[in-house]
Image (tube, rainbow, N blue to C red):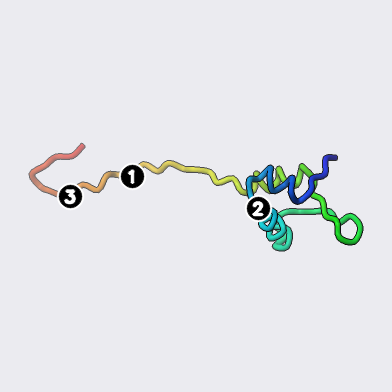
Amino acid sequence: MKLLSVREVAEALSISPSLVYQLKDERKLRYLRIGKGTIRFRLEDVEEYLSNCTVEVRLEVRKAAVPHLKHLKVN
């Protein structure tokens, strides 16, 4: 089991350490408390957080906004 520090998680996610603490406090990112003031993050939990952040892009095909002109035929 690989344990990461706040700084390592911040670097891995390209975010600030303060945002890592915020995600921890909001319980969006699981963590382990080791001793009184030491926290660590499991690599698996960071990967799970990332997978939960993934936004799927759906391409919707919409008909173009075509004015309804009676003398034009649009296919």
Residue sitting at x 85%, y 40%: 1
According to the picture, the residue beneath numbered tag 2 turns out to be 16
Secondary structure of the residue carrying tag 1 is loop
Residue sitting at x 89%, y 55%: 34
Q: How many marks?
A: 3
Residue sitting at x 85%, y 56%: 38
Asked whether the residues under the numbered discs 3 and 1 touch, taking CB atoms below 8 Å apart as contact, a structural biologist would say: no
Query: Picture quarter containing residue 3?
Result: top right
According to the picture, the residue beneath numbered tag 3 turns out to be 67
Secondary structure of the residue carrying tag 2 is loop
Residue sitting at x 76%, y 54%: 30
Position of 44 compared to 53: left or right? Answer: right
Label 2 – label 3 distance at C-alpha:
49 Å
Q: Amino acid at mark 2?
A: Ser
Which of labels 2 and 1 is toward the front?
2
Label 3 – label 1 distance at C-alpha:
14 Å
Q: Amino acid at mark 3?
A: Pro
According to the picture, the residue beneath numbered tag 1 turns out to be 62
Q: Nearer the viewer, residue 36 or 58?
A: 36
